[in-house]
């Protein structure tokens, strides 16, 4: 029991930041999903840098980034997007309410990302041409969802 | 080629936030690793809530949270902690330089988290007692690393 309580205390300390963030609606879910996006951005930076010729192609690094991107696509997201966690509830998110509206094609958008990431995983380590070919659909899937469902900052 | 360029443009738009964040040293790596921590915090919130009796035990939800925690432990972190990405380089992180110093036991800390998450994954869905027993080592692993390697905010 002592160990359990000590563990809980440590977990409480570890979660102190998250608890503070709870002050605004859906703060922890928003932070978590934005966090996964940040991890993806790091991987896309590696792949995009090679695709644009800014960084020399390296099969191992490209494959790792593609594997990591895929890992985030298969990561369970069921807790990240509760209904109502849009930018009208909390300005910390740019997610538009229409994500959750009837007739929303958010599922199709997610599927497109899954397919593009799968193709990237298959292609990234095979050569620069393969990586470039797979980059279009990945970028398209990212942008397709962001353009449709993210508050424009323009 | 047109598709490729359109994809890159979309990816560039998607990465606009990340690009801005690049203005400070290691900003994208710091954001990505903090993001993974936020995702973990959400899962730990579910498990901790049940362990503390604040939320009724639910085997399915507990198992999902434990699986998700485990998924972040196995997620590749090799790009997240480049040497020098400590709080002396960028105040956005609380990571202390001693993480990277010779003799650092950061590897042992990571191993402890892996073991604790594995035990939680095995126990979380079996009942509240199992979850509680597994919570101590998980909290201990979180706190052990944070206490040793994170700038104290006290």
Image (cartoon, coloured by chain):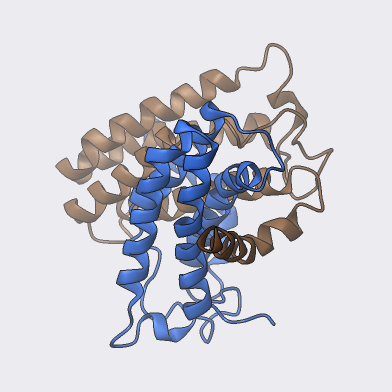
Chain colours: A brown, B blue
Quadrant for residue B153, please give it.
Answer: bottom right
Tell me: B93 left or right of A88: left
Q: Which of B101 and B16 is in front in this view?
A: B101
Q: Which of A11 and A43 is in front in this view?
A: A11
* Residue B5 appearing in the image: no
Q: Where is residue B43 in the image (x, y as percent from the top left)?
A: 55, 44
* Residue A144 appearing in the image: yes
Quadrant position of the N terminus of chain B in the picture: top left
Q: In this view, does B1 lie above or below B98?
A: above
Residue shown at 78%/40% (left/top)? A87
Q: Is residue A110 above or below residue B96?
A: above
Residue placed farthest to the front in the image?
A1
Quadrant position of the C terminus of chain B in the picture: bottom right
> How many numbered callouts?
0
Residue shown at 57%/44% (left/top)? B47
Q: Where is residue B55 in the image (x, y as percent from the top left)?
A: 69, 38
Q: Nearer the viewer, residue B42 or B7?
A: B42
């Amino acid at each position: 029991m002592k160990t359990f309580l000590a563990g809980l205390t440590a977990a409480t300390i570890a979660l102190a930041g998250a608890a503070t963030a709870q002050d605004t609606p859906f703060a922890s879910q928003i932070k978590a999903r934005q966090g996964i996006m940040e991890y993806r951005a790091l991987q896309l930076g590696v792949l995009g840098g090679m695709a644009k010729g800014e960084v020399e192609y390296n099969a191992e690094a490209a494959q790792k980034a593609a594997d990591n991107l895929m890992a985030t696509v298969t990561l369970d997201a069921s807790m990240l997007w509760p209904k109502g966690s849009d930018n009208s509830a909390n300005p910390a998110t740019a997610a538009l309410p229409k994500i959750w509206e009837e007739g929303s094609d958010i599922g199709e958008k997610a599927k497109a990302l899954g397919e593009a990431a799968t193709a990237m995983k298959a292609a990234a380590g095979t050569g620069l041409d393969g990586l470039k070919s797979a980059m279009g659909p990945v970028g398209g899937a990212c942008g397709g969802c962001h353009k449709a469902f993210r508050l424009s900052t323009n």
